[in-house]
Image: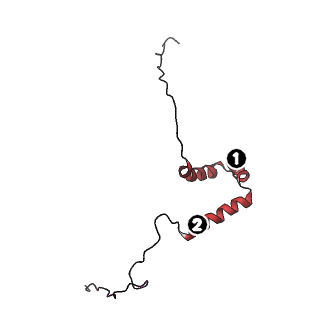
Amino acid sequence: MAAATKKQTGAKQVFGDGTPGPGRKPGVPNKVTRELKEMILAALDNAGGEKYLAQQAIENPTAFMTLVGKVLPLTVNANVKATVALVQALPLDDSL
């Protein structure tokens, strides 16, 4: 079994010497992801925007609902205020 070798680096760390760089700051999207999203939104705009999506909801409901499922959790910000009423069930009459 070969002995593990340790890479010797100088005092100054330079990209390419095997030391990882600082990377992206948290929350900054990948450049390819951002560009792809921009292209998809431009294509949607060229296809008719909301009117096109409404048409797809009718013609391809499965694909449309998949899209909604992927987008909805990212956009829902609801503050719900509701009143709940207690409803008591009546016993069933066996003679009916």
Mark nearer the viewer, 1 or 2: 2
| Marks 1 & 2, CB-CB < 8 Å contact | no
Judge by depth and name the residue closer to the eye, 88 or 33: 33
Is 16 in the magenta?
Answer: yes
Label 1: state its secondary structure: helix
Q: State the image quarter where residue 36 is shown.
A: bottom right
Label 2: state its secondary structure: helix
Residue 5 image offset from top left, x and y in percent: 29, 86
Prevalent SS, magenta region: loop
Farthest front residue in view: 12
Judge by depth and name the residue closer to the eye, 81 or 3: 81
Determine whether, in the image, residue 61 is placed left or right of residue 90: right
- Measuring 63% from the left and 52% from the top, which residue is drawn there? 63
Q: Is residue 36 above or below residue 50?
A: below
Magenta part of the chain: 3-28
Work out which quarter of the rendered image holds the N terminus and state it.
bottom left
Farthest top residue in view: 95
Q: How many numbered discs sit on the rendered protein?
A: 2
- Measuring 73% from the left and 59% from the top, which residue is drawn there? 47
Q: Can you tell which mark lies on residue 35? A: none
Determine whether, in the image, residue 27 is placed left or right of residue 68: left
Is 6 in the magenta?
Answer: yes
Q: Which residue is mark 1?
A: 58
Q: Is residue 84 above or below residue 10?
A: above
Amino acid beneath label 2: Arg
Q: Is residue 54 above or below residue 27?
A: above
How packed mark 1 is, by other alpha carbons closer than 10 Å (few <14, some 14-19, many 20 or more), is few
Q: Answer with mark 1 or mark 2, whichever residue precedes in sequence.
A: 2
Q: Which residue is mark 2?
A: 34
- Measuring 46% from the left and 68% from the top, which residue is drawn there? 25
